[in-house]
Amino acid sequence: MHFASDNTGPAHPSVMQAMMEANEGYMLPYGADPVMAEVTERLRATFEAPEAAVYLVATGTSANALALATLCEPWQTIFCSRLAHIQEDECNAPEFFTGGAKLTLVGQGDKMSVSELRRAISGEETRGVHGPQRGAVGLTNVTERGQLYSLEDIRALGGLAKEFALPVHLDGARFANAIAATNASPAEMTWRAGVDAVSFGGTKNGLLGVEAVIFFDPGHAQQFEYRRKRAGHLFSKHRYLSAQMLAYLRDDLWRNLGAQANAKAAYLVAALECLPDVHFDTVPQANMVFCSFPRHLHQRLHAVGAAYNIWSGTLSGEDPDELLEARLVCDWSISHELIDRFVDVLKTG
Amino acid sequence: MHFASDNTGPAHPSVMQAMMEANEGYMLPYGADPVMAEVTERLRATFEAPEAAVYLVATGTSANALALATLCEPWQTIFCSRLAHIQEDECNAPEFFTGGAKLTLVGQGDKMSVSELRRAISGEETRGVHGPQRGAVGLTNVTERGQLYSLEDIRALGGLAKEFALPVHLDGARFANAIAATNASPAEMTWRAGVDAVSFGGTKNGLLGVEAVIFFDPGHAQQFEYRRKRAGHLFSKHRYLSAQMLAYLRDDLWRNLGAQANAKAAYLVAALECLPDVHFDTVPQANMVFCSFPRHLHQRLHAVGAAYNIWSGTLSGEDPDELLEARLVCDWSISHELIDRFVDVLKTG
Amino acid sequence: MHFASDNTGPAHPSVMQAMMEANEGYMLPYGADPVMAEVTERLRATFEAPEAAVYLVATGTSANALALATLCEPWQTIFCSRLAHIQEDECNAPEFFTGGAKLTLVGQGDKMSVSELRRAISGEETRGVHGPQRGAVGLTNVTERGQLYSLEDIRALGGLAKEFALPVHLDGARFANAIAATNASPAEMTWRAGVDAVSFGGTKNGLLGVEAVIFFDPGHAQQFEYRRKRAGHLFSKHRYLSAQMLAYLRDDLWRNLGAQANAKAAYLVAALECLPDVHFDTVPQANMVFCSFPRHLHQRLHAVGAAYNIWSGTLSGEDPDELLEARLVCDWSISHELIDRFVDVLKTG
Amino acid sequence: MHFASDNTGPAHPSVMQAMMEANEGYMLPYGADPVMAEVTERLRATFEAPEAAVYLVATGTSANALALATLCEPWQTIFCSRLAHIQEDECNAPEFFTGGAKLTLVGQGDKMSVSELRRAISGEETRGVHGPQRGAVGLTNVTERGQLYSLEDIRALGGLAKEFALPVHLDGARFANAIAATNASPAEMTWRAGVDAVSFGGTKNGLLGVEAVIFFDPGHAQQFEYRRKRAGHLFSKHRYLSAQMLAYLRDDLWRNLGAQANAKAAYLVAALECLPDVHFDTVPQANMVFCSFPRHLHQRLHAVGAAYNIWSGTLSGEDPDELLEARLVCDWSISHELIDRFVDVLKTG
C-alpha cells in the first residue's frame, strides 16, 4: 500500500531490459553514443521540433535548475507558484545554478492564474536597477497538488510571458501524466503555447533516473552544455541514460505509463468518493490524490503499514476526529489489489 | 522642495571638515589607520559591546549583504518583510553574496509580527533536506514605510529567532532615526534584544557614504574580512571612511541628525494634517511620511519642481481627484522654509 | 581495440544483475533505502572507519566538487597538480561548487612532490586578507598520467598538509587501481595518511555510474547533504546507486576489477616494450599506458579502427616518423585478444 | 619616508576642493547627478570613444572584477600574468564576481609575451566541454612590478586575443603612470590596440577612492549596471565619486599626477644607482622601484621609520649582507626631501 511518491516504485521491465542491452561492448562516452542520437531524433519528432536541442540528466532538480539558469540572469527573478518544486523541494538549487536569481511567488495556491501572474510581473517593474529584474516564468504541469494546467491555461500564461518578452520553463516531472490527462500533443503543451524549455520527466514514470531537457530554440544549446558539465551532470557512461530514455519513447511507453498511473488514481478516487469520511478539497486530475479524513483512520492505516504522506497535520494528536490531509500518489506500477486493500482499511476503520 | 530620499541631500559640514583633516600626510591603508582604531572603540562604547567586531563599508547594500552572507548558509532562507530593502532594492545582492540563499517573505506588510514570523519559520520546517533550511531573520528599523519596531517588538522577534537558534540581522540604514524616535539605547535595540549583527547606517544621515557593520560575536570577524575583501568592499584609502564615521560618532552627531530629520518630518506631518485633502494610512514615526492626496495636487507640485516619489499610482491619469500616495522623506538638512513652501503649494492647489 | 577510456566499456555483469534485483517492489527514496544502509556499513568496514559519513553520487565531477566545497571556503585556494582532473576536466566545477575558490597548480608534472607542495603553500602566505587563503590539498591516485602515489608519498603530503592545518581530498576515480597496484589498505591510503575525504570511484571500474564520497570526520555530513541536494545530485530512486555500489563491494569486486585492469595494462606494456618503435616516457603503474610511436603507426591503427586518444601531436601531419604520444587505457573488460590485435597492427605497421 | 604604496598618501587638494563644492544642496542619487554627465563626456573625449559606456566605482578590485564578470562566462578562464593583481591581491574576487571562472597564469614573470600568451591560449583548446573555455585576456599596465607594456606590446597581445575572438581587459590602476611613461594616447593604449574594457584608476593617483570602468562597446552597459548594483557598488550619494573624477579629468590632473609620480621615482632611481650596494633586477619604468640591498641597510632604514615593503626575504635574519628586495612606491605627493633622506640613510648605512 505504497502511495508515498511516484519515486518509490520500480522501473518498468522494458526499461531494465534496455539497460541490459545497452551494456554490450564499447560505446563513446558523454552523450556521443549512437543511442543518444536516436533519442534526440525521437524527442524532436515527439515534440514536432526538428531543431530542438535535447539533453539528458539524471535528476529532476538538475533538469529544472540547469534549464532555468540557461534562461535566466542572476539579477532576475523567476515567477513561479508558491508550491512549485523549484521553490519548495530543491534546497535553493535554482538560486545556486543561476548564480543568485530570486524566485517571486505568484498567487496563493498551486496553479497560477493569468491575473495573478500579471500582478506579479507588474509588481517587479518600477525600481529600475534596484529591484530584481523580470526573468523566466516557471510553470509545472501536473502541479505539485495534482492539478492540471489546460492547454488554454498554458497558452494564456505563455502569451502573457511573451507580452513581457519573458522566457517560459515547464517543469514536466509529470509531463506524461499531463499529456495523458489533457490529450494535448507535446507540441501543443509546450512551444506552441509559448514554452521555451521543458523538463521532460521520466524518473517518476517508470525510469530509473532520467529527465530530458529540451530547448526549442537551439541557440541555448552551447550554454547548456557548459552548465551541465560544470555542474557534474554530464555522464561519462551516458549510454545508460540514453537507453532508458529510448525505451521510454518506444511504443509510446511514456504516454502509456502516464495514462496507467492516472487510471490507477481515478480508480482510487472512485472508491474514496464512496466513503463518507473522506473529503476532497480539489478534484484529482492526474495521478495524485489529496483528500482529508479523520486522524483515527490515518492511525489505522499506518498501523497496517500503509505508506503515504500526511500533508497537513500530524499523525499523533488528541482529537481522533480531526481531519488530516493525505497525499496519495499512484505510480504506473501500483496494483488494483493494493488500492482495494487501502480502501478496505478506510472502510472498516 | 526635495523629499525624494535621504540620499539626495548634502553631507554634514563637520563630516566634510573631518575629511579634509584626514587628508594629511601618510596613513596605513585597508583599515589599519589610527582613525579606524578610534572608530572601533567608539562604536563598541556606543553599543556597550567591548568585544564587538566593527567594520566599515561604503554602501548599505554591501553592509546588509555581507552581514547576511556571514550569518547565513547558501542552502538557507532569510526571513524578512516583503518590503525589506534586501528584498526590493538590492537587485538580488543577498542571493549573490550568500551564494544562493533564498528570501522568505514574512507577513503582508512592512513590519512583521511575531505570529507572522512564527508562521513563516514553521512553514519551512517539514521537508528535510529538500526545502530551504531556516536561516537568518532580517529586520529593518526604521522600516521602508517609515514605521518603527519598538524595543518590545525587537525583543519579541529576537526571542523567537533564538527559540529556533536563528541569527538576527538588523538593517539600520535609518538606525539613528529609530534610536531618536524610541529613545532606546543602541545596546537595547540590538544585542540585548537578540540582534547578532547590525548595519549601522550613516549615508542616509549626513555622511557621504559609510555604513558600519557590527557583529556582537567577534567569532564572525575573520569570515567577514575575507568576504569584504573578495567583494571589493575593503577600501585602500580607508582613512576617508574612518574619518566620516568618527565625525559621525563625535558629540553624538549621528543621534542628533537622526532626531533632526525626525523633527522635520513631524513638522511636515503637523502641517499636512491640517489639510483636508491629505490622508494618512499610517502614522509617520520617523523621517518618512507616506500620505495620499489627489492627482491634481501632485501635478501642481511637480509643476513647481517638488521632488518626491509617487509610491502608488501614476502622475498622469484621467481622474484629477484620484488619490495617489506620496513618499516624502526628510533628511537632516531640509529646512522649515522648504517644508512650508511645499505645504503652501498643497494648500493653494 | 578500444583504449579510449575506462568509461567506454560495459558495466560488470554482476552489477547489472544487482540492478535487476534492486528493481523489485517499493523502496524508500533519497538514500533511505535499506541497500544504502548496507553500503554504508560495508564502506565503513572497508575503510576501517566506523564513524565515516558515506554518500553516493553518480559522477566523478560531482563527487570531487562537492567534497572540495565541503572542505574549502570560497576565499581559499585548492592546491593540486596542473594535470589534475579538477583542474583540466571539470569545466570549472570546483570553482562553481565552492562559490569561487581558486586552484593553485603545484609543480610542473602530474604528481606533486612534498617540496613542490611546500613551495606552493608557502607562496600563498604573505598577503594577509588580500591573497587567496590556503585551502584544501587535492591529490589524485592513480594520477591522470597513470602514475602512483605510494603510501609514503601520501603520508608525506598528508603530513605536510596537516602541518598547515589544511584538509586533504583524494580523487580516487581510479582508487581501485591504486589499491591493487600498491597493495595498501584503503585505510592506509586515506585517513591514516592524513586524507580527510575521498572520492571512491566506481564508474571507471565496472559500474554504470556511481562514486562514493567518504568523509572520515562525520562532522562534514550535514553540510554535504545540503550541498548534494541543492546541486541536484541527490537521487530520488537512490536504490539504483546503492545496488551498484553494493555489488561493487561484495566479494571484493572493486579490488578484483582494479587488479584485472592493471593486469591488462601490464600485458599490453610487456608487448609494447618489445617493439623498437614504441617509447615510454614514464613507466606505466596502473591501467593507463602513455607511450610514443611514429605518426604512420598511429595512422595505421586509426585506419583499422583502433580507438584511443593521441595525447600530444595530431594524427595528420607531414612527417610520418614524428613521434606522437598515445594514451592507452585498459578497463577491466578489455580482452587479451583485442590487445594482441592492437599490438599486431603496430608490429606489422 | 613612505614608499609603502601609492595608496598611503593623501588626495590632491583640488580633489578635496571638488568634494567640498559637490556638497551643496540636493542632487539626484545613483549616478543621475549632473556631474556624472560631465564625467562621462570628458572620459569619452579623453578616450576618443564617443559611444563608450562609463561607470564609477570606489575600489580597484570592484572595477576589475565587475569588468571581467561582464566580459567572461563562469565556465571560461581568464588569461593573466601570475603576478597580476586579479590573481594575487583580490582574495578570489574575479572568481566570485564571474560566478566561478578560472584564472590561467601566463608565463613566469610579470609581463606576458605574445608567445607565452599564445601557448597559454593554445593549452586550453583540446578538451571540448571538459576543460575551462577560453575567456578574457587580462592585462595590467603599469604592471605589478613596475614594468610597462609598450604600445607595440599591447597591440600584439590585443591582436592575438582578437585572433581567438577573446575580449581584453586592461587593469589600469596605474593607467596614468603608463600614459605618462609611454606618451601614448588613452585611445592608442586601449581600444585602438584591441582592449575592450579598462579600469581607469584614480585611487592610487590622487583621488580618495574612485576608478572608472569604461567599455568601448556600449552593448556591455546594461549588464554592468545590474552587476554593479547587485554587488553593492552603486553609490547612492554618487555625486562624491563624480566630483573626484571630474577634478581628476580637469586640466589633465590625472596625467600630470602620473607624470609627477614617475618623475619622483626617476629621481629616486638616479640616486640609488649611485650606491654600490643597491642592485636592480629590472629597470624601473614608472613609479615603482624594485631593488635589492643588504639586510643591514634594510634594518637601518626600518630603525629610522622608513616605510616600504620587503618583497623577498625577511627583515630579521642572520646574514647582514644577504640581499633583500625592496618595493619602493612613489606617489604624486612624495617630496624630494623625503627621497633624499631615504637615500641618505642608505648612503650612511
Image (tube, coloured by chain):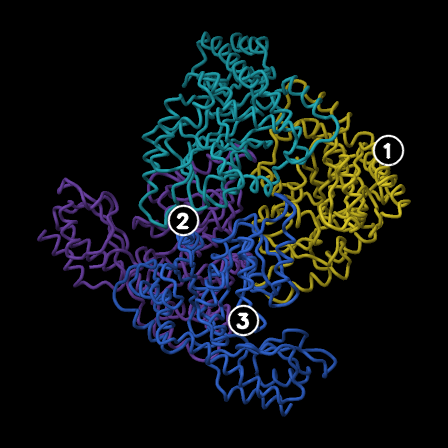
Chain colours: A blue, B yellow, C purple, D cyan
Q: Which mark is residue C91?
A: 2
Amino acid type, callout 1: His
Q: Amino acid at mark 2?
A: Cys
Q: Quadrant of residue A35?
A: bottom left
Provide residue B46's location: percent of width, then percent of height.
79, 37
For label 3, the crowd category at 10 Å Cα-Cα, with few meaning under 14, some 14 to 19 and many 20 or more, is some
Q: Nearer the viewer, residue B273 or D339?
A: B273
Q: Which residue bears the numbered disc 1?
A: B336
Q: In the rendering, at what x and y percent does residue D117 appear?
A: 35, 33
Secondary-structure class at tag 2: loop
Residue D18 vertical position relative to residue B81 in the rendered view, above or below: above
The chain carrying label 3 is A
Q: Is residue C152 visible?
A: no
- Circle 1: element type: helix
C-alpha separation, residue under disc 2 versus residue under disc 1:
62 Å
Contact, mark 2 vs mark 1 (Cβ under 8 Å): no
Asked whether residue A93 is in view, the answer is: yes
Give the labeled residue for mark 3.
A150
